[in-house]
């Protein structure tokens, strides 16, 4: 079992930055591929970014590529999402997630564990 707790959400103006953190506890964090998803009101949950546990390779949704950066610190059992140049359309609840697979996946059903989510609101 893996427990995930997100933090770092909040209200920011368009063009600003936020860094989300996800603290993991439970089984060996370093053996899980970690990801971030988001869900805006009235929309389906969508993939944002993922980072592999094998080689720390990363993968991003096209909508955030070049603006968001995912990273992990295995010593701290923490994964981060640095979000720059935020846009109002980035407003959503952001969820941290983990899967036992070696590499990224973009489908929410392919992830095994989920955090409770943290709200990110970008004002125009």
Image (cartoon, rainbow, N blue to C red):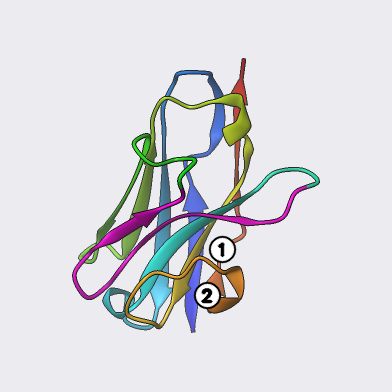
The disc placed on residue 115 is: 1
In the image, residue 13 lies in the stretch drawn in magenta: no
The disc placed on residue 53 is: none
Pinpoint residue 107: horizontal percent, then vertical percent: 56, 69
Could you classify mark 2 by the number of other residues whose Cα lies within 10 Å: few (under 14), some (14-19), or many (20 or more)?
some
Could you classify mark 1 by the number of other residues whose Cα lies within 10 Å: few (under 14), some (14-19), or many (20 or more)?
some
- Left or right placement of residue 91 versus residue 2 in this view: right
Pinpoint residue 114: horizontal percent, then vertical percent: 56, 68
Secondary structure under tag 1 reads: loop
Observer-nearest of 10 and 121:
121
Extreme-front residue of the structure:
62
Identify which residue is drawn at 54% across, 77% down: 110
**Which quadrant of the figure has residue 84?**
top left
How many numbered marks appear? 2
- Left or right placement of residue 98 versus residue 103 in this view: right
In the image, residue 54 lies in the stretch drawn in magenta: yes
Pinpoint residue 55: horizontal percent, then vertical percent: 18, 70
**In the rendered view, would you say 72 is above or below 54?**
above
Q: Quadrant of the C terminus?
A: top right
Identify which residue is drawn at 23% across, 66% down: 74
Extreme-right residue of the structure:
42
Find the magenta span and give its range.
Answer: 43-61
Decide: marks 1, 2 in contact (CB < 8 A)?
A: no
Observer-side mark, 1 or 2, equals 2
Secondary structure under tag 2 reads: loop
Identify which residue is drawn at 66% across, 56% down: 45
Marks 1/2: CA–CA distance? 11 Å
Q: Which residue is mark 2?
A: 111
């Amino acid at each position: 079992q893996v427990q995930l707790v997100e933090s770092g959400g909040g209200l920011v103006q368009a063009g600003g930055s936020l860094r989300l953190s996800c603290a993991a506890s439970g089984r060996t964090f370093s053996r899980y591929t970690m990801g971030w998803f988001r869900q805006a009101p009235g929309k389906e949950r969508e993939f944002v970014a993922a980072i592999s546990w094998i080689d720390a390779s990363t993968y991003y949704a096209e909508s955030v590529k070049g603006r968001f950066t995912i990273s992990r610190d295995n010593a701290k059992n923490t994964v981060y999402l640095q979000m720059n140049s935020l846009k109002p359309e980035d407003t959503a609840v952001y969820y941290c997630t983990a899967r036992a697979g070696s590499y990224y996946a973009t489908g929410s059903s392919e992830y095994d564990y989920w955090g409770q989510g943290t709200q990110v609101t970008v004002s125009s």
